[in-house]
Image (tube, helix red, strand yellow):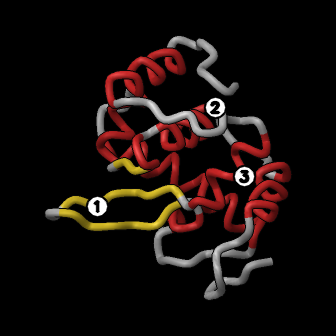
Amino acid sequence: MAGIAGEAPSPHQYVTAFRKLRGVTDAQLQLLRLHYLAPRRTVTATQMAQCAGYDHYSAANAQYGRLGRLVGEQLDYNPAQERLGTLVTFEKRRGVWYWLMRPEVAEALERLGWVEAGGILLPEELAAAAEAFIEGGTPRGS
Protein backbone atom coordinates (compact mmCIF):
# COMPACT_ATOMS: atom_id res chain seq x y z
CA MET A 1 0.00 0.00 0.00
CA ALA A 2 1.85 3.07 1.25
CA GLY A 3 5.33 1.62 1.64
CA ILE A 4 7.90 2.13 4.36
CA ALA A 5 9.38 5.44 3.23
CA GLY A 6 6.47 6.87 1.25
CA GLU A 7 3.71 9.30 2.12
CA ALA A 8 1.25 8.52 4.87
CA PRO A 9 -1.58 6.22 3.78
CA SER A 10 -4.87 7.83 2.86
CA PRO A 11 -7.86 7.78 5.23
CA HIS A 12 -9.41 5.14 2.95
CA GLN A 13 -6.31 2.94 3.32
CA TYR A 14 -6.47 3.32 7.11
CA VAL A 15 -10.18 2.38 7.06
CA THR A 16 -9.36 -0.77 5.10
CA ALA A 17 -6.50 -1.62 7.46
CA PHE A 18 -8.59 -1.08 10.61
CA ARG A 19 -11.34 -3.32 9.19
CA LYS A 20 -8.84 -6.13 8.55
CA LEU A 21 -7.30 -6.03 12.02
CA ARG A 22 -7.41 -9.19 14.10
CA GLY A 23 -6.34 -9.49 17.70
CA VAL A 24 -6.98 -5.85 18.63
CA THR A 25 -7.74 -5.50 22.33
CA ASP A 26 -10.32 -3.30 23.99
CA ALA A 27 -7.43 -1.51 25.72
CA GLN A 28 -5.88 -0.62 22.37
CA LEU A 29 -9.17 0.70 21.01
CA GLN A 30 -9.60 2.68 24.22
CA LEU A 31 -6.23 4.35 23.69
CA LEU A 32 -7.10 5.15 20.09
CA ARG A 33 -10.38 6.79 21.07
CA LEU A 34 -8.85 8.68 23.99
CA HIS A 35 -6.14 10.02 21.71
CA TYR A 36 -8.75 11.11 19.18
CA LEU A 37 -10.63 13.01 21.89
CA ALA A 38 -7.53 14.79 23.25
CA PRO A 39 -7.13 18.51 22.54
CA ARG A 40 -5.57 18.89 19.08
CA ARG A 41 -5.35 15.06 19.14
CA THR A 42 -2.07 15.51 21.01
CA VAL A 43 -0.97 13.62 24.12
CA THR A 44 2.10 12.43 25.95
CA ALA A 45 2.56 8.79 26.88
CA THR A 46 2.13 9.78 30.53
CA GLN A 47 -1.16 11.57 29.83
CA MET A 48 -2.40 8.59 27.84
CA ALA A 49 -1.46 6.19 30.62
CA GLN A 50 -3.19 8.30 33.27
CA CYS A 51 -6.38 8.59 31.20
CA ALA A 52 -6.42 4.84 30.58
CA GLY A 53 -5.78 3.99 34.22
CA TYR A 54 -2.25 2.62 33.81
CA ASP A 55 0.37 3.09 36.53
CA HIS A 56 3.17 3.96 34.12
CA TYR A 57 3.54 5.45 30.66
CA SER A 58 5.32 2.32 29.43
CA ALA A 59 2.06 0.33 29.52
CA ALA A 60 0.29 2.84 27.26
CA ASN A 61 3.34 3.00 25.01
CA ALA A 62 3.44 -0.80 24.70
CA GLN A 63 -0.30 -1.17 24.01
CA TYR A 64 -0.46 1.66 21.50
CA GLY A 65 2.79 0.53 19.88
CA ARG A 66 1.37 -2.97 19.35
CA LEU A 67 -1.67 -1.44 17.69
CA GLY A 68 0.60 0.69 15.51
CA ARG A 69 2.49 -2.46 14.49
CA LEU A 70 -0.73 -4.29 13.57
CA VAL A 71 -1.99 -1.35 11.50
CA GLY A 72 1.43 -0.87 9.92
CA GLU A 73 1.54 -4.52 8.87
CA GLN A 74 -1.84 -4.17 7.15
CA LEU A 75 -0.65 -1.02 5.37
CA ASP A 76 2.95 -2.10 4.74
CA TYR A 77 3.83 1.24 6.33
CA ASN A 78 6.39 2.00 9.03
CA PRO A 79 7.62 5.60 8.79
CA ALA A 80 9.71 5.55 11.97
CA GLN A 81 11.73 3.20 14.10
CA GLU A 82 8.88 3.36 16.59
CA ARG A 83 5.92 1.30 15.35
CA LEU A 84 3.65 3.91 16.88
CA GLY A 85 4.68 6.14 13.98
CA THR A 86 2.05 4.40 11.88
CA LEU A 87 -0.62 6.16 13.96
CA VAL A 88 1.16 9.32 15.12
CA THR A 89 3.87 11.81 14.43
CA PHE A 90 6.19 12.85 17.24
CA GLU A 91 7.08 16.29 18.49
CA LYS A 92 9.47 17.11 21.31
CA ARG A 93 8.55 20.14 23.43
CA ARG A 94 10.66 21.24 26.37
CA GLY A 95 12.15 17.78 26.70
CA VAL A 96 8.82 15.93 26.53
CA TRP A 97 7.69 13.82 23.58
CA TYR A 98 4.15 14.40 22.32
CA TRP A 99 2.12 12.06 20.14
CA LEU A 100 0.11 13.82 17.42
CA MET A 101 -2.52 11.61 15.83
CA ARG A 102 -2.10 11.52 12.08
CA PRO A 103 -5.02 13.37 10.44
CA GLU A 104 -5.55 10.38 8.15
CA VAL A 105 -6.05 8.14 11.20
CA ALA A 106 -8.54 10.59 12.74
CA GLU A 107 -10.52 10.74 9.50
CA ALA A 108 -10.52 6.95 9.21
CA LEU A 109 -11.89 6.62 12.75
CA GLU A 110 -14.68 9.06 11.85
CA ARG A 111 -15.51 7.20 8.64
CA LEU A 112 -15.68 3.92 10.57
CA GLY A 113 -18.00 5.47 13.14
CA TRP A 114 -15.61 4.56 15.94
CA VAL A 115 -15.58 8.19 17.13
CA GLU A 116 -17.87 11.19 16.83
CA ALA A 117 -16.57 13.53 14.12
CA GLY A 118 -15.14 16.68 15.60
CA GLY A 119 -15.41 15.42 19.17
CA ILE A 120 -12.71 17.10 21.26
CA LEU A 121 -12.72 16.98 25.03
CA LEU A 122 -11.21 19.30 27.57
CA PRO A 123 -8.63 17.65 29.85
CA GLU A 124 -11.18 17.15 32.65
CA GLU A 125 -13.70 15.72 30.17
CA LEU A 126 -11.02 13.41 28.82
CA ALA A 127 -10.52 12.02 32.33
CA ALA A 128 -14.29 11.39 32.59
CA ALA A 129 -14.28 9.65 29.19
CA ALA A 130 -11.38 7.47 30.34
CA GLU A 131 -13.35 6.58 33.47
CA ALA A 132 -16.27 5.47 31.30
CA PHE A 133 -13.95 3.15 29.37
CA ILE A 134 -12.45 1.72 32.54
CA GLU A 135 -15.87 1.09 34.07
CA GLY A 136 -17.12 -0.51 30.87
CA GLY A 137 -19.31 2.40 29.86
CA THR A 138 -19.87 3.51 26.31
CA PRO A 139 -18.14 6.80 25.49
CA ARG A 140 -19.33 9.16 22.80
CA GLY A 141 -19.07 7.81 19.32
CA SER A 142 -19.08 4.14 20.23
Which residue lies under the disc numbered 3? 108
- Determine the secondary structure under disc 2: helix
**Point 76% across, 36% down: residue:** 113
Q: Amino acid at mark 3?
A: Ala
Image quadrant where residue 30 sits: top right
Q: Amino acid at mark 2?
A: Asp
Q: Is residue 28 above or below residue 134?
A: below
Q: Name the disc covering residue 106, or none.
A: none
Image quadrant where residue 97 sits: bottom left
Q: Is residue 67 above or below residue 95?
A: above
Which residue lies under the disc numbered 2? 26
- Determine the secondary structure under disc 1: strand
Closer-to-camera residue (89/20): 89
Label located before the other in sequence (3 or 1): 1
Q: Is residue 2 above or below residue 10?
A: below
| C-alpha separation, residue under disc 3 versus residue under disc 2 | 18 Å
Quarter the C terminus occupies: top right
- Determine the secondary structure under disc 3: helix
Which residue lies under the disc numbered 1? 97
Q: Amino acid at mark 1?
A: Trp
- Closer to the observer: label 3 or label 1? 3
Specify whether 139 is left or right of 60: right
| C-alpha separation, residue under disc 3 versus residue under disc 1 | 24 Å
What is the x, y in percent for residue 87?
57, 60
What is the x, y in percent for residue 93?
21, 63
Q: Mark 1: few, some, or many residues within 10 Å (few <14, many ≥20)?
A: some
